[in-house]
Image: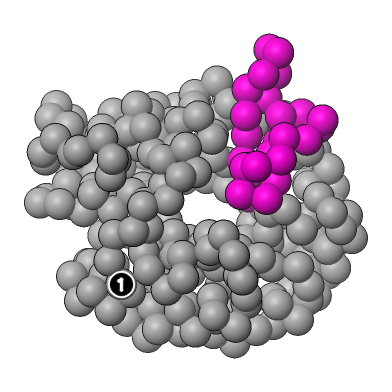
Amino acid sequence: MINNRLILTLLISDGLLVNSKGFILNPVCNISTMLTYLNFDLFDEIVILDVTRVNRNIDGLSRWISQISSKCFIPICGGGGVTSIHDCETLSNSGIDKVVINSAAFTNRKLIKEVSQTFGSQFVVSSIDAVFKDGKYYICTNDGKFPREITVVEWVKELEDMGSGEIYLRSIKQDGSALGYDINLIKLVSESTSLPIIAAGGFGHFRHLENGIIAGAQAVSIGNLFHFMGEGLSGAKQYLLNDNVKPTTTIWPFAMPEKIL
């Protein structure tokens, strides 16, 4: 599994790093504190998402990315509220290598194509928030608040035709659960597209990394910051790099109160 990427997802809301569980946000710390203690060398790539619920703006995200990129020397994907080529240019100038686009791709079907033609398809990461109902997976937009009557498979095919270069795939139900990625969702999408998939939402144990890769993802994302305790992340990276390393203990070093999981 040496070619598979371990990705850190940082969620930022109003300038604070937050954890998400079922898309409900809980504050963790400010960005300066995170930069002081987090070892970015443990990852292959970082995804930075602005999940501010009110008054989200690209200039704020750009400032946060600039702050993080000054201390980080691995590829950065950034997004959250991206709606135009100008937004992409602003984030590119702040230090991102790829842009993450979610809801705007649904409301403006030309956006992905325009960004891909301007920056190249490798620049575009299309984010999908998925919900399971009536036996099928459907997409949700606007921070998971609006289920749409289009299946994930249908949407992935559209995104591929538009010029997306990669899919960031997250299950709303599994988000923050620490119960593992949604394996059925990953399999379904991997069988319907040739685009690389980043599996997100649900990581909580070393074996979840392997499960995500086996299901068809090319990269696995660790999100909630409580995974950073102790030697957890070192073990997670080593697990992907070496098939002989099979940790049997949970990545969670201690029990967390339910309200902040």
Instruction: Specify the farthest residue to the top.
Output: 135
- Closest to the observer: 105 or 46? 105
Q: Point out the stretch of residues depicted in magenta.
A: 127-152
Residue 221 in view here: no
- Image spot of residue 100 (x, y percent): 62, 61
Mark 1, secondary structure of its residue: strand
Going 24% across and 47% down the picture, which residue do you hit? Answer: 227
Q: Is residue 129 magenta?
A: yes
- Image spot of residue 170 (x, y percent): 54, 40
Asked whether, in this view, residue 218 is left or right of residue 2, the answer is right
Residue 181 in view here: yes
- Closest to the observer: 187 or 49? 49
* Colour scheme: one colour
Going 28% across and 28% down the picture, which residue do you hit? Answer: 207
The quadrant the C terminus occupies is top left
* Residue under numbered circle 1: 30
Going 41% across and 60% down the picture, which residue do you hit? Answer: 10
- Closest to the observer: 218 or 178? 178
